[in-house]
Amino acid sequence: MNKISEPERFRAFLIDKLPEPLTPASSHLQLTDRYIADTAIRLRSIRDPQSKAVNYSMQKKTIVRTDSGSYSRSEEMHLTDNEYATFARFMGRELRKNRYFHEFDRRLLTFDIYLGELSGLGIVRVDLTDNTDFEQFEPPPFAVFEVSEDPFFDSDKLAGNTFPQVKAEVERIGHEWPAENPYQDE
């Protein structure tokens, strides 16, 4: 199935660890994104570790920031194994993360725990319905601080960075990062 999404309102927050009852061993998906150089296109591989099923897609994601908040729009085309292999030859920055889902305060939250060079970074995202919902949303208690409006924390910008660069950005904007890395790279 190929699709173009409606604009998705969201807010995103750094977290220093997965909130209970989640643990790194909880059910999750393994995402690998390869951002094709000089384009807004990424190849995505989604693997379910339990079933071993893998799905491939090509995506173009645009994040728009306005005075009334952030939203994203995605275009997606599903790929066969052979199509993915053909496109994977293009050089690009890679980003790997485990994605967890958890309901909190009657909302489904998405937790991305980054791997590889970004090991130590965790971001929670909540999708919202409209401007009122956006403005009235109370950050969860496990949110360290909000990064919705900071382009540095967009996935395409994070790809190719390292965790020390993330820590430096966090400190530059006036926050401290926890001393220990609670995540283990797979």
Image (cartoon, grey):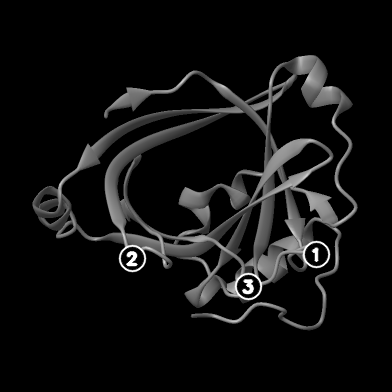
Percent position of residue 172, x then y: 77, 61
Which residue is drawn at the image coordinates 31% and 59% (left, top)? 53
* For the residues bearing labels 2 and 3, Cβ distance under 8 angstroms: no
Q: Which residue is label 3 attached to?
A: 24
Cα gap from disc 1 to disc 2, whole angstroms: 26 Å
Amino acid type indicated by mark 2: Lys
Q: Residue beneath label 2, please? A: 52
Mark 1 highlights which residue? Answer: 20
Q: Residues within 10 Å of mark 3 (few under 14, many from 20)?
A: some
Q: Secondary structure at mark 3?
A: loop
| Residue at screen point 50% across, 63% down | 97
Residue 82 position in % (x across, y down): 9, 53
Residue type at the position of mark 3: Pro
Q: Amino acid at mark 1?
A: Glu
Does the rendering let one see residue 37? Answer: no
Could one spot residue 76 in this view of the protein?
yes
- Quarter holding the N terminus is top left
Q: Earlier in the sequence, mark 1 or mark 2?
A: 1
Mark closer to the observer (2, 3) = 2
Residue 166, compared with residue 153, is above or below; it is below
Q: Position of residue 75 (x, y in %)?
A: 36, 29
Disc 2 element:
loop
| Real-space CA distance between mark 2 and mark 3, rounded to the nearest whole angstrom | 17 Å
